[in-house]
Image: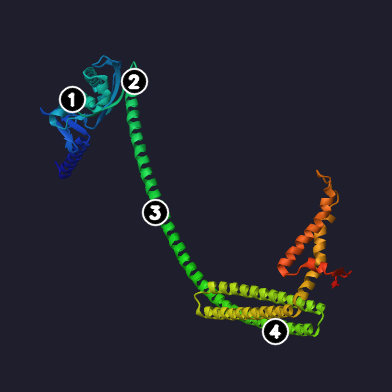
Amino acid sequence: MSTSGIISIIVVVVILVLFIILVSYIKAPPQIAYIISGLSKQPRTYIGKGGIRIPFFERLDKVFLGQVTVDVKTSRSVPTNDFINVRVDAVTKLRVIPSPEGIRLAAKNFINMDDKKMAEQVQDSLEGNMREVIGSMSLKDINIDRDRFSDEIAKKASPDMAKLGLEILSCNIQNVVDDNGLIVDLGADNTFAIKKTAAITKANAEKEIAQAQAIARKEANDTEVASEQSIAERQQQLALKKAELKIEQDTRQADADMAYAIQQQIQQAVVNRETINAKIEQTKREQELTAEQVRIRENELKATVNKEADALKYQTEVDAAAELEKKKRAAEANAYAAEMDAKAEVARAEAKRTAMILEAEGIKAQGEAEAYAIQQKGLAEAEAMQKKAEAFEKYGKAAITDMVVKVLPDMARATAEPIKAIDNLSIYASDGNGVTNVTNSVPVMLKQTFDVVKDATGVDMSEIIKNNQRIKIDDDSQVTVKK
């Protein structure tokens, strides 16, 4: 055989070997186990790695190693431990046990099946296990403690699944339904209990909120009261300060008013003193004038020797005395008024020495004026009395008689005036002399008048009449006595 023939054979062999290698090489993914069997007694298993499978002599099978989800439902109602029919819906997660024995058992039961096929194969077994667990638990336990219910299902089904090369990863209860609505009733009971608890919790919360609000309101009120108290204290301090300033202002104003009043009192005292001095001077001048008038009148009376002149002189002296008395009284009244004014001024400005001194001077001047007035009055009265005595002594009883005679007409008129005033008179007398008694009363009253004159003056009017003296009353009320 030539070299080229040998090379061709070698090339064909190499190509054939390469083809066989390419066709025989396998590589298993992580979630699938490749099982090669045929030539050896024990199959080879490849998970996530490659290997050689001899075509036509060895077999390649697959086992799904991923999670298998099984929806387990009771096809009909199952009675619980307390004989209440329920239907349960649960979801179970399974996988092949990651061990050679588990893979071997899974390969025997689930070879070349996908996850759905595997779920269909174990669904009946899991449903049976769930029924057994439902029958061993009460309805309340199933609903209240679902974790325990799930654990019981997984615990119950695990041996059976292990025989198939599977393990239970989880079991979750989706829904539990009873035919008589008892779960709803239990839920209502729990609902009311929950609502009660919630209501109590809410009431406690509202109570706490109310307490917190009350505390907050109290704190706010305390803050407000403290603020108002602080404001009131500041206002009181302000009022006290204003009062102090007002007192100080009033004090200064009072001092100014007092100074002004004192000045006014001083000026008024000066005015009063000058007024008193002027009044004293006026009184002196009036008294001098009166004295001069008296002297003039006295000279006139002395120059006249008839009785009418003497009477006129006497009347003048009386008028002068009356005028002097009137002026004296006026001076006394003015002096008294000035004294009262001075005393009032002294009382208002008692604390001021200057006013007191001035007022004292005024009082002293007033006293001097009063003393001088009294002295002049006494002198005038004494002089008048002396003149009167001289007149009486000069004219004697004739003058007195003349004076009495002058008033006789008035006495007669006064005696007859009550009878003249009678308009209508009714006289009743037991002796029939009523009219006579009335007319006779006039002489009787005149006789009584004569007696009074005699007692007072010593002039006996009856003797004058007996001595043939006549009393004549002229039209001008002049009275003359003739023999």
Say which element carries label 2: helix
Considering only vertical position in the picture, is 40 above or below 317? above
User: At label 1, which amino acid type do we have?
Assistant: Lys
Q: How many marks?
A: 4
- The picture places residue 27, in percent across and down from the top left corner, at 21, 37
Are dots 4 and 3 in contact, CB under 8 Å?
Answer: no
Residue 261 figure quarter: bottom right
The residue identified by callout 4 is 288
Crowd class of label 2 (few under 14; some 14 to 19; many from 20; radius 10 Å): few
Task: Measure the alpha-carbon separation of dots 3 and 1.
Answer: 73 Å
Q: Residues within 10 Å of mark 1 (few under 14, many from 20)?
A: some
Q: Residue lying farthest left?
A: 41
Residue 226 bears which disc, if any? 3
Specify which label sits upstream in the sequence, 3 or 2.
2
Could one spot residue 172 in this view of the protein? yes
Q: What residue is at 71 percent from the left and 67 percent from the top?
A: 456
Q: Amino acid at mark 2?
A: Asp
Residue 326 versus residue 97 in the image, above or below: below
